[in-house]
Amino acid sequence: RMRRITSCAITGVAWVSMAIAELPALAQRIGYTVSASVWGDNGPTIIRVEEGPTAVYVAMRHGTTASVRHTATGKVFAAFGPRERAAAALAAEGFAGALDEPAFAAELEAVRQHQISEVTDQLLPGISALATPVFDGFGQLVLCIAVIGPSATLQTGPASPAAQHLREAARGWPVRATPEAPPPQELARGLRLRGGCPGWRTLAGRGRRPQRRRAAQRGKPTRAAQRQRQPIELTSGG
């Protein structure tokens, strides 16, 4: 069953919102439809799709769960995510033990080496896709971005123009997880947050809690401002 992704849960996380903001420009640069995915309850889950100039007719939308075995996005999570998690998802798809198959293991090793996953006519005839991982500041996989297009025109391979654009985007985004942000799988659960988005802080220092914004709008001093106004008592030997 497709799970609804709440916009509050998505935009409240700094590194996801920054990545999603870049998808329209990325789709225009590559010329094809691009997507962003996180790991959800049932596997890789698409949280955003941005159409490019080249039309592609596939059933890919927000909340769709991607195959770990047959999609470029799924193979990125299999290559860089926890092995036990990938094995369980593959078993649920009917591919138990796939991680131990020499051909699939070699494919995942190539994904790790080039940081690019590719599929051609695997899930849908005439459709190809490329995907790359996006890591946080601690080297943990937080999401995957992918490009999908007609096999007749979309060039695949680690050295293809689309692959280069994906890698450059993933490396250039200011993606950094914070202790106050929920894990990526919370996004795919459509988490209902009481009282609106918590407003998690970003490492760039631009995030503010909603309470502080409301206080500033009412003209009342925030706690930080009140602390700054308090006189500082200087003592000798300090």
Image: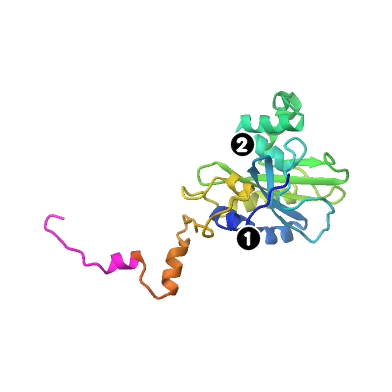
Q: Residue at x 48, y 61 (%)?
A: 207
The Cα atoms of the two marked residues, 1 and 2, are separated by 24 Å
- Relative side of 127 to 10, left or right: right
Q: In the rendered structure, which amino acid carries the disc numbered 2? A: Gly
Give residue 190's position: percent from left, percent from top.
Answer: 63, 50
Query: What segment carries the magenta color?
Result: 224-238
Q: Which residue is mark 2?
A: 81
Q: Secondary structure at mark 1?
A: helix
Label 1 Cα neighbours within 10 Å, binned few <14 / some 14-19 / many ≥20: few
- Depicted 31 relative to depicted 64: above or below: below
Q: Residue at x 63, y 60 (%)?
A: 21
- Depicted 228 relative to depicted 120: above or below: below
Q: Residue at x 37, y 73 (%)?
A: 220
Magenta span: chief secondary structure: loop
Give residue 101's position: percent from left, percent from top.
Answer: 74, 24
| Of callouts 1 and 2, the N-terminal one | 1
Q: Secondary structure at mark 2?
A: loop
Q: Is residue 208 magenta?
A: no
Q: Which residue is mark 1?
A: 21
Question: In the picture, residue 85 is in which quadrant?
Answer: top right
Q: Is residue 226 magenta?
A: yes
Choose between 231 and 187: the one closer to the eye: 187
